[in-house]
Image (cartoon, rainbow, N blue to C red):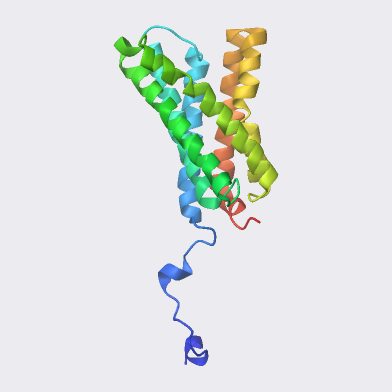
């Protein structure tokens, strides 16, 4: 006799229900998305160590832009994890913060793609406008990192490392202003390794940290 036959009204468990995630996303999915983040950040870091962040002339410009695009794709993977786990909170405003950031990042991705592959468009006004979404999207990531740390739905290193990773813009830009391009290139590329690449590995090896929050 099965346990369900002894409990009136109990439904027999199925393979799909037994494997259903507790917080809206399977750990295997978190791992895949997290490795996408690490791969993208590692790619941009490697390209930046070789060429820097501010280059002119192909093929360097194309390579650096496509390296940045790889990072942005990885960042979208991170935003998916945030959204599906309620990392910033479960209110409409909290979830809306992530959605707004996805739009900002998407517009920045368009800039990276067009600027990298279509040299004739690099001096156009509309692409110059899109360029503004690069720093805006990175600043938005920093805001999300602060919100995750305060909200506390992610646990352990997953709660604090997003703030480390997403401080890239508030570390790299002042370094550029104070010390110039060569130093900021090294700092920015290193920060990608310490921050986003490491965050992806944390989430890949410990996907349980983003589930079971408050």
Q: Position of residue 49 (x, y in %)?
A: 52, 17
Q: Is residue 172 visible?
A: yes
In the image, taking residue 87 as reference, residue 99 lies left or right, namely: left
Name the residue nearer the viewer: 34 or 151.
151
As displayed, is residue 191 above or below residue 19?
Answer: above
Q: Position of residue 185 (x, y in %)?
A: 57, 15
As displayed, is residue 21 above or below residue 166?
Answer: below
As displayed, is residue 35 above or below residue 167?
Answer: below
Name the residue nearer the viewer: 91 or 142.
91
As displayed, is residue 38 above or below residue 171?
Answer: below
In the image, taking residue 195 as reference, residue 42 lies left or right, namely: left
Q: Is residue 37 visible?
A: no
The residue shown at (65%, 35%) is: 163
The residue shown at (61%, 19%) is: 172
The residue shown at (43%, 17%) is: 129
Image quarter (top left, top right, bottom left or bottom right) of the C terminus: bottom right
Q: Position of residue 100 (x, y in %)?
A: 49, 37
């Amino acid at each position: 006799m099965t346990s369900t036959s002894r409990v009136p009204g109990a439904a027999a468990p199925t393979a799909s229900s037994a494997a259903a995630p507790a917080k809206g996303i399977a750990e295997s999915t978190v791992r895949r998305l997290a490795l996408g983040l690490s791969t993208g950040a590692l790619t941009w870091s490697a390209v930046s160590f070789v060429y820097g962040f501010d280059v002119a002339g192909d093929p360097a410009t194309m390579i650096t832009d496509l390296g940045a695009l790889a990072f942005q794709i990885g960042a979208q993977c991170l935003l998916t994890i945030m959204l599906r786990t309620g990392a910033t909170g479960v209110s409409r405003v909290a979830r809306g913060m992530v959605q707004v950031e996805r739009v900002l990042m998407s517009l920045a991705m368009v800039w990276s793609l067009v600027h990298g592959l279509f040299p004739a468009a690099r001096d156009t006004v509309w692409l110059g406008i899109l360029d503004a979404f690069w720093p805006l999207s990175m600043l938005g990531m920093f805001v999300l990192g602060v919100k995750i740390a305060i909200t506390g739905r992610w646990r352990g290193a997953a709660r604090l490392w997003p703030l480390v990773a997403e401080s890239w813009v508030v570390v790299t830009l002042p370094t550029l202003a104070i010390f110039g391009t060569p130093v900021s290139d090294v700092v920015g590329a290193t920060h990608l390794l310490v921050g986003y690449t490491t965050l992806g590995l944390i989430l890949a090896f410990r996907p349980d940290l983003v589930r079971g929050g408050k």
